[in-house]
């Protein structure tokens, strides 16, 4: 006994060491897998890659092509970027690409034309700093034509514009907003001194109507995800990972969901979520973050929301409001699920359930093509991917 | 075999260096070939640096080396080859194959001895792997994080193998763990790599890991 034990001791210790280092090796291997995931998802480069290069390069491009480089940074429904441009030295024609749509989410094309209006506004704002005076003709081929605007350009003294300076800082902010109210004067300063004919901007900031509109937004979100076709059409524009984001350079991405840096990194490290999980996340975020922290809602109204010209003007107005909000340090988040349900019900010919509820919160006769929330941001919005000016120029 | 390994490694290193120069100068012009990187200049220069490491390894293959150093230099050949798959896109395919082949050829003679040598230096191998993970993450990072990651990863590899004074190696370990964990704290993985690396580095520094795995220190 006394002679065998000393011989057995080194063997037991060696086995323990081997097992110990095997465990350490397994931990290192797991760390390696996570490191590869961090590399593949570009977790350490949020907002990087070619898909985000247009945000960094747009100021450097001179002349009409520079104006197009500003136009492509505008908001659009689900970041579909439904635009194309034909550029000469003296003019820019703006076309809508009917293939880039959200299907049953926007069955009447209202949001697509509003998005075209947003791009047109950026384009116009970017002309003056480049020594160009733009003259805009809307729908030169009629409401059914793909050409939504013809912009004639003439030489003019270069001048700057505070809204132009905010173009690359304007991002949809889906994160939480601070509980600080936005003063009525600050809200009023976001509107145009004189809105285009037929358009009006209404603010809903008092607690009771704000809560009623918030509840209606949550109901609309739940109705939208319960409508399978709308859920499918929503999810079709979700880009679940960095590869898809860089390849498509459009759509809804994790960077645009208003996450904190840690939440964003974890979301990117995890496997992509399913459609049902994404729907649940959106409804919960609508209830617990978007409506729960909105300081006020803005609703752009018109008696004729189906008029293409009005839709373009509404988009231009929304873009100006968003740029003014950005310049003032306020966050803005378009929230169109109610109007998406209104249009869906209208297109399907079913009973109108959301239109009368929304109308009850608005002045008589006012119909809402666009709505959004504003507030003081807890954190900045992040840039979302963009196709470059060269990719959308004929 | 060693001569073939040296020639293969040299060819791979030279091609990798050329790929790095192409990435640094023309990466933005030919993104389809170079992986459409956001910071082609930085990644190109990083690739040239890794090609230099691989070239030194290839030159060492010409000389007679004990199994341990030979295995280490084989890692110095294969590592840059694999890492550069993430820095120069398609341009890395041929040099990566050549460098990995050179590493295999270099340890092919006396594979059992090489395996025992690797086992004897297993903590250093793990620490080097963690440095490689940092270089991998740096390859897809924002430019200034990329620079921090490149320094950190290199420092961790050097800490594993450099025959320097303990104070210098401790400094390399800290340089290889703290900065990237600090700048990438929000991304979870850089702090995790640091947390895993520190106790392994402590084991390396404490024992210098010269004894074979399975034998008590």
Image (spheres, coloured by chain):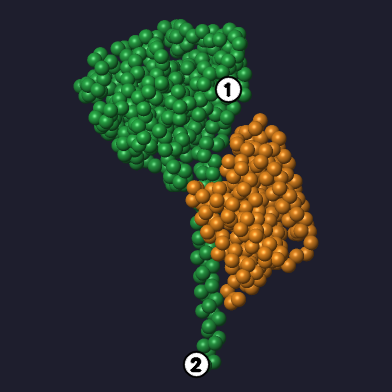
Chain colours: A green, B orange
Which label's residue is closer to the chain start, 1 or 2? Answer: 2
Please give the chain letter of the residue carrying mark 1.
Answer: A
Comparing B28 with A120, the one in front is A120
Res. B209 visible in picture: no
Disc 1: which residue: A390
**Would you place residue A88 above or below residue A216 in this image?**
above
At 53% across and 83% down in the image, what residue appears?
Answer: A9
Q: Do pointers 1 and 2 mark residues of a single chain?
A: yes
Res. A173 visible in picture: yes
Residue A391 image position (x, y, % from top left): 55, 23
Disc 2: which residue: A1
Q: Residue furthest left?
A: A351
Q: Are marks 1 and 2 in contact (CB under 8 Å)?
A: no
Within 10 Å of disc 2 (Cα), the crowding (few <14, some 14-19, many 20+) is few
Q: Is residue A131 left or right of residue B2?
A: left
Comparing A302 with A42, the one in front is A302
At 56% across and 14% down in the image, what residue appears?
Answer: A128
Q: Residue furthest bottom?
A: A2
Within 10 Å of disc 1 (Cα), the crowding (few <14, some 14-19, many 20+) is few
Residue B129 image position (x, y, % from top left): 60, 57
Please give the chain letter of the residue carrying mark 2.
Answer: A
Query: SS class of the residue under badge 1?
Result: helix
Q: Is residue A20 left or right of residue A353?
A: right
Residue A238 image position (x, y, % from top left): 42, 34
At 37% across and 29% down in the image, what residue appears?
Answer: A182
Query: Based on the displayed image, in which of its 4 quarters is residue A78 positioned?
Result: top left
Q: Is residue A223 left or right of residue B200?
A: left
Query: Based on the displayed image, in which of its 4 quarters is residue A267 positioned?
Result: top left
């Amino acid at each position: 006994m006394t002679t065998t034990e000393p011989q057995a001791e080194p063997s037991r210790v060696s086995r323990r060491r081997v097992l110990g280092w095997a465990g350490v090796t397994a931990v290192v291997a797991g760390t390696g897998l996570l490191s590869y995931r961090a590399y593949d998802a570009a977790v350490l480069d949020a907002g990087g890659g070619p898909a985000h290069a247009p945000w960094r390069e747009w100021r450097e491009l001179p002349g009409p092509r520079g104006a197009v480089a500003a136009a492509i940074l505008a908001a659009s429904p689900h970041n579909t970027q439904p635009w194309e441009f034909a550029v000469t030295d003296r003019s820019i024609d703006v076309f809508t690409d009917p293939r880039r749509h959200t299907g049953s989410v926007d069955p009447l094309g209202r949001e697509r034309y509003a998005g075209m209006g947003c791009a047109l506004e950026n384009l116009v704002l970017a002309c003056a700093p480049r020594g160009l005076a733009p003259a805009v003709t809307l729908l030169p081929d009629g409401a059914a034509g793909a050409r939504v605007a013809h912009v004639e350009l003439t030489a003019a003294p270069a001048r700057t514009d505070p809204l132009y300076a905010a173009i690359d800082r304007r991002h949809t902010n889906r994160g939480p907003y601070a509980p600080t109210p936005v003063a009525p004067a600050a809200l009023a300063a976001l509107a145009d001194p004189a809105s285009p004919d037929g358009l009006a901007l209404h603010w809903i900031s008092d607690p009771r109507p704000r809560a009623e509109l918030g509840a209606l937004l949550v109901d609309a979100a739940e109705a939208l995800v319960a409508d399978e076709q709308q859920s499918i059409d929503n999810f079709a524009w979700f880009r679940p990972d960095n590869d898809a984001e860089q390849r498509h350079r459009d759509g809804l991405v994790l960077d645009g969901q208003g996450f904190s840096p840690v939440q964003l990194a974890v979301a990117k490290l995890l496997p992509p979520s399913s459609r049902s999980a994404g729907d649940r996340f959106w409804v919960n975020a609508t209830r617990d973050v978007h409506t729960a922290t909105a300081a006020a809602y803005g609703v752009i109204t018109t008696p004729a929301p189906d008029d293409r010209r009005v839709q373009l003007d509404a988009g231009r107005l929304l873009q100006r409001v968003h740029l003014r909000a950005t310049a003032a340090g306020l966050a803005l988040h378009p929230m169109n699920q109610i109007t998406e349900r209104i249009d869906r019900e209208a297109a399907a010919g079913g009973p109108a359930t959301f239109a009368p509820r929304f109308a009850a919160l608005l002045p008589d006769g006012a119909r809402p093509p666009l709505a959004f929330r504003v507030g003081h941001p807890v954190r900045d919005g992040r840039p979302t991917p963009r196709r470059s000016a060269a990719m959308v120029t004929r | 075999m060693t001569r073939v390994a040296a020639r293969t490694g040299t060819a791979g290193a030279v091609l990798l260096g050329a790929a790095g120069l192409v990435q640094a100068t023309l990466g933005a012009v030919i993104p389809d070939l170079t992986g459409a990187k956001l910071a082609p200049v930085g990644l190109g220069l990083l690739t040239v640096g890794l090609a230099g490491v691989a070239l030194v390894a290839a030159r060492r293959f010409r000389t007679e080396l004990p199994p341990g150093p030979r295995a280490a230099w084989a890692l110095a050949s294969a590592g840059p080859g694999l890492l550069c798959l993430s820095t120069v896109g398609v341009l890395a395919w041929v040099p990566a194959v050549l460098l990995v082949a050179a590493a295999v050829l270099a340890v092919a003679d006396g594979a059992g001895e090489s395996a025992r040598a690797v086992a004897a230096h297993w903590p250093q191998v793990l620490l080097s792997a963690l440095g490689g993970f940092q270089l991998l993450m740096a390859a897809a990072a924002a430019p200034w994080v990329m620079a921090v990651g490149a320094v950190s990863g290199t420092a961790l590899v050097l800490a594993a193998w450099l025959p320097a004074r303990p104070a210098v190696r401790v400094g390399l370990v800290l340089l290889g763990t703290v900065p990237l964990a600090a700048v990438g704290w929000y991304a979870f993985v850089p702090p995790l790599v640091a947390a895993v690396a520190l106790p392994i580095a402590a084991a390396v520094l404490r024992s210098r890991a010269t004894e074979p795995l399975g034998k008590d220190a």
